[in-house]
Each structure stands twice: as structure tokens, then as C-alpha cells.
Image (cartoon, coloured by chain):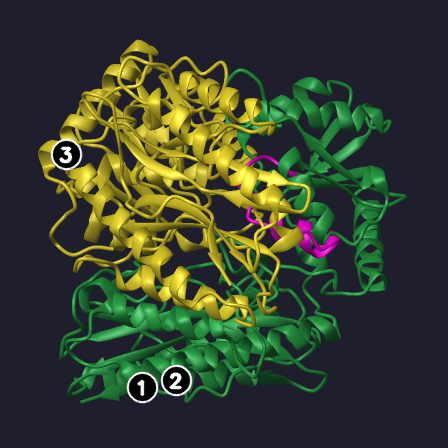
Chain colours: A yellow, B green
Amino acid sequence: MIDKNPNFTPQEYQARIAKTRAAMDAAQLNAIFVTDPSNMSWLTGYDGWSFYVHQGVVLTMTGEPIWWGRAMDAVGAGRTVFMKGGDTIRGYDDTFVQNPDKHPMQELAALLAEHGLDHARIGVEMDNYYYTAAAHATLTTNLPNATFKDATGLVNWQRAVKSSQEIVYMRRAARIVEAMHARILELVEPGLRKNDLIAEIYATGMRGADGHWGDYPAIVPMAPSGMDATAPHLTWDGRPMVKGEATFFEIAGAHKRYQCPQSRTVFLGNVPPKYQQAEAAVLDAIDAGLEQAKPGNQAQDIANAFNAALNKAGFEKDGRCGYAIGISYPPDWGERTISFRAGDTTVLQAGMTFHFMPALWLDDGGLEITEPILITPTGHECLCNTPRSLWVKP
Amino acid sequence: MIDKNPNFTPQEYQARIAKTRAAMDAAQLNAIFVTDPSNMSWLTGYDGWSFYVHQGVVLTMTGEPIWWGRAMDAVGAGRTVFMKGGDTIRGYDDTFVQNPDKHPMQELAALLAEHGLDHARIGVEMDNYYYTAAAHATLTTNLPNATFKDATGLVNWQRAVKSSQEIVYMRRAARIVEAMHARILELVEPGLRKNDLIAEIYATGMRGADGHWGDYPAIVPMAPSGMDATAPHLTWDGRPMVKGEATFFEIAGAHKRYQCPQSRTVFLGNVPPKYQQAEAAVLDAIDAGLEQAKPGNQAQDIANAFNAALNKAGFEKDGRCGYAIGISYPPDWGERTISFRAGDTTVLQAGMTFHFMPALWLDDGGLEITEPILITPTGHECLCNTPRSLWVKP
């Protein structure tokens, strides 16, 4: 959240808008309507937990973007967006909120028509969480002469290469997640209630690091133990931690909405040979993957090298092993563009940031040892200095 | 999150399914596909932070519900849902995840056809966050002979009256949010960095109360100060708290995904007359609203009484002043059914739970003093004992 010192200069927002317009031009679009909160924020600076109602940013080929949302959130827009113009923030009446008798997209249609877009080619984020089937149906019905095109990911792709200021924020988030993991290692022991450990993880994350405050991660801590850790996305409960179980901690540090996720796994007690083998295999495979993390290579090169090393050691991983990261809002801290998996031929460039996420879910537990990375002009840099191993506590 | 002791008995899940089927029958539906994570959980017990990929629950008029989602999350479904049958959990291949070349809904269409639903009348939650425009387009294209009907809110409405076990969990969440507010009042003072206070709010919420663990609230703390508090949904940053400003804390306690939100406002220093007047007006208006909170009255009766009292004191509130609460996942802790506002004629019944949310956003700050309530057979009960006033620290 925000003071009157915006997180980026107006020039940076203008550069982002110019990049986005080039992509709009290539897609032959006159306008886009952006509902992804991370895209809204990246284009305008808007910040607020208001994405549970319909809202978005309209960008045409000229002029400033328009923030559009619930009238009471227009005040928050005024506190956070870089635009100064009076017509750049537009609110709709509260009676449209969660009311089956009418839909906010009726209002948006009127706004677009007012801007001469009723016959335009308009890009919408068809597969974004906050662009529902009903939103699309209402908008298209109310603008029958406009042409709607799928622009899912159009803005997200412009975010792939980070600016130097964005990298500053990513590094601060990296310091925070390091501190969170250090706190876990310090406290974890048999008998500790999981939720009490989660309390400490949250508190450390919010306090921040190096004097930089902690923002909320776009996903809550995932911290399953034992058999629950055979599943990737369970959270926590109040049971005490027990000897003989592995627990993975998939968490993120965050600063000014920039996310730095990292996972580590703790084993309480004597590590069974299978976990030792899995650890060795994953560490080797991470090295193999990281060796491919350099400009000019493709995203899939990292996955292929990682998987080959893992398979050689007798392990297998089904899912993708990494994805782009940056600014984000719930429910996902990924950018939903580049994935480390076979078939993703995206060429890596300096300034891209990823969560290299080589998790293994075994028959009787899980092992996650992951690295957030920055592609540099000559290779890559791991953003965190968290010790890279399976952590063991007696 | 979950152990092998589910949060509710199989009988309770069956009763919920029976209620839902009656509503499906009334809407002439053969099946529903439910993507709202709170509806998925309420119908099956499923719990996991996996709603950032396409998933849902299929319910027909006979047999058990089917959990459908990403293959790696099928493991988590196996750990959490009440169903025991082998065909009740269905996972799709990871290559469908965030891949512009194919869409998971192709797989869902095949699953529905396999169950003889390719000519059925199927209800979908058109206006749910997790049912995107692309999801609907793909599903309808791949099932051209099925008829799709909007079933937004169909399951949510079945959740309005809570079971006794649900009320047990709501009360535990109420104890937790009381503890969080007590901690705020204890610590808040000029010079305290906002994020350090947020750290303590989170830690208190996760530790829980009365031995019951804290789960994650469906919204992060909203805690703006001064002019930022003229907007309702800003979160926090690292600036220190200062004398002469009001800060509202809109937070929730949570237990087993049940949410108990409550807001309080703290003024640091001498309270200006305007805030004293606003406090008096809001407290009176709360009393007037609560007087109408009883079975047989309508939802709007509370809003009308509240607004009349507020207007009499010279204040005005634009938005709704309350909404139904219960089990929830991000991005919203409301149930998105009943609202306290003019025109909502829903008849109140014993067992309904609401966040009575009479917030005032003033020219130079905000005032939120709110009450989570339970409708009882004879009237209502405030779920929390948090002292009801504007809190002042010198």
C-alpha cells in the first residue's frame, strides 16, 4: 500500500504503456480492458484488495489509462495511480455490487461507448480469474458492434523483463523470504503446533528485512507434513509437528507487491535413505537446470536438463518446474506466461525473473528445494542465499 | 487444512447435497459445475490453495459429487473430501495448466459427456471469480448439445443457515478476531511501523484462541491510516503510525476456513469533535440496526433502520452495511448472497450469520466499528465481545 511516493516514476509507467501499445498494435486492437490486478497495478500503480468486485483498467492507443471500478474504490485509486487527470478514474454505483438484477459491466459498456469504442476491436483477458463468464456475456451484449478478442497474457508478457527498480523490489522480497526460512529453521521441532510456526513465518515476513517492510504474499504459506505433503497445495492446521516426517514450506517474501517465492523442506529425526537419495537427485538436477539458465537459451532447456538429471537418478517429476515471477496479487504469485517445461520455447533474456520450482512429491511425502532466479547478461543469479539442502532437525 | 478427521460428518455433507439438489430441481437442472472454492469445500470438504488453476465439483441428481481438477491436486482432494469412491476424484494432465494451446475445460467436457451429460441442463457459476470467460467458452463449445444455465449463487444460498457444527467453528473464529483486536489495542502507538503491527495481528490470528488454531482469513488485514482511510480497501505499508490520525483495522479471525470479520478504529491523540460525532452516530445507528436483526424481518430492515439513525445524526453511508458470512476463500470473506441494503427482502432466519458492517468513510479519514452477528430464534447475538467504541490512545 501506498503513500504519495509512488513505487515507480511516471516515466516508467509511460514506458510500460508504450510497450503494451506496441503489443496491442501487433494484435490489431484499439483498446484493452485489463482485469488482472497485477496488470492493473503494473500499468497504473493501482493497489488495493478490491478485486473481489468487478473492476479493471481501460487502455486505448492514446491518452492516459482509465481506472474503472466500484465508486468506493475510486478513492483508493486516487491514492495510488500515477494518472492525474480527472477523467482517468471512474467509479460505478454500489447497487451494482453482487446484485443479480444488474451487472457492473453494463456501466463499463457505457464508458467504452462514451470513449467511441462501441465499434472498436477490444482485447479482454478471457482466462483471467477476475473476468468472469457473466462479465464477458454482459459486456458483449451491451456492445453488440464491438469486436472482442482474447488478450489473456498480453500485458503479462510485457512484464517478463524487469526494470532496475523492479529488481530492487525483488531483491528486497528475497531478503524477506530468506529471513522467513531462517526463522523456520530456528524454531521447527517436534511438538511445535504447525499454526504456531505459521504465526512466526507470517510475523517475520511482515516485519520485513533490511528495514524494508513486508507486504502480503499472493499465496498463503503451504506447509504440509508427512502424507499431506504428497499433495502440493495444502496449507496448515493445529497438529503438532512429529518426528519422522518431512514438512515443506512453500512461502514467499513480498515487498510493494513484488513476490519472491522459495521452498525448503525440513525433516525431523533421522532421514530415511529414500529422502537422502531424493535430496541428492534434486540438488544435482537443480545444478543441471541452472546451468541452462542464461540469455539465449529457451525456457524448456532448463526443464529438459533438470528432468534428464532427475530421471538419471531414478526420480520423475510430472509438472512444470518453474514459472515467471514479479508483481502479483492472489490467487497466484506466478506471472502466467513462461513455464519451465518441454515445449516452452521462450528465449530467456537478461532481467527475467523465475521461480525455479523443482518439487518432488513422493509416495509418502514431499521434497521442495527451490530457487528464485534472475537472468543476468551472462547467465543467472540466485536471488536468495538460503542454504540449499534438505534441512534436518534431530 | 486437514487430517483424517474431516470437519463435518458424512451425514452433514449428505444433508447439504440434498438441499442443493432440491434447488437444482427447482431450477430444472440435471447437474451443476461449481467452481467457487467455498462451495466446493462446503459440498465435499475439499481444502487447498489450488483455485489458481481450473477446478470444480460436479454434482448430478444422484450419486456422489465428483471433484475435478489438476492431477497434482487430486492428491490433496484425496486427503480432504468426504467421498470414498474411486471415481469421485478426477485429475487432468499438468500440460493443461496455463497453456494457451489447450484448455482444461476440454477435459471437463469429456468428463461430463462420459457421465451422460452431453445433452443435459447444466448450471454453471457464471459470475464466480474462478469461472472465466474462456472456461465458459471452451466448455460450451465442447458440449454443443448441452444447455447451460446461470447457477451463480445457487449453492451459496444453501449455505445461508448454518448448522450447529458450523456455528461452533464461527464462534472459534470469533474468539480469534477478539484476540487480534485486543493485541492491536495493546500495541498501537505513535511511531510503531504499520507493518510491525500487521506482523502481530497475523501472529495472533494464526496462534488462534482457546486452543483452537487460526486459519488464514480470506482477505488480508486492511489497515489504512489518515487520508488513506478515506478509501476502504487499502492494505498497509512501512510508515510509522502518527498522532492525530485514525486507523481502521478490518480483519477476520478464521478457523477451518470459517471466517469471522470485525473492524475497529483507533485514534491516536486527541479525538477531533467530528470523530466524536461520527462515533456517537454510528453507535446509535448500530443499535437501531441490531434491533431489527431478528427472524422474520428482512435484510433491508437492518439497513433502513441503520441509515435512518445515521441520517438523523447528519451522516450518510452510500454502500451496503452488511453481508452474509461463513466458510470462505480469497478473494472475499462474504457469501455473496444477502446484503443489508434497501431492496434486499431476504427474510432473516435463525442460524444465519452476517457481518454488520456500518463503516463510514469521511472526508479526511475512516471509521469502522462493525459486528459479526448470528440470528437466533428470538433475535440476534453478537458473536464477539470486542468493546464497541472508537478506541483512543494518547
Image quarter hosting the C terminus of chain B: bottom left
Q: In the rendering, at what x and y percent does residue A249 appear?
A: 47, 52
Q: Which mark is residue B182?
A: 2
**Is B100 colored magenta in this rendering?**
no
Q: Is residue B311 visible?
A: yes
Q: In the rendering, at what x and y percent does residue B80 appear?
A: 71, 53
Q: Residue at x 85, y 55 (%)?
A: B18
Q: Residues within 10 Å of mark 3 (few under 14, many from 20)?
A: few
Secondary structure of residue under mark 2: helix
The answer for which chain carries disc 2 is B
Q: Residues within 10 Å of mark 1 (few under 14, many from 20)?
A: few
Q: Quick check: A287 left or right of A65? A: right
Q: Is residue A299 above or below residue B87?
A: above
Q: Which mark is residue A18?
A: none
Q: Is residue B230 above or below residue B296?
A: above
Secondary structure of residue under mark 3: helix
What residue span does the magenta drawing correspond to?
A: B36-55
- Circles 2 and 3 on the same subunit: no
Which residue is under mark 3?
A164
Which residue is under mark 1?
B186
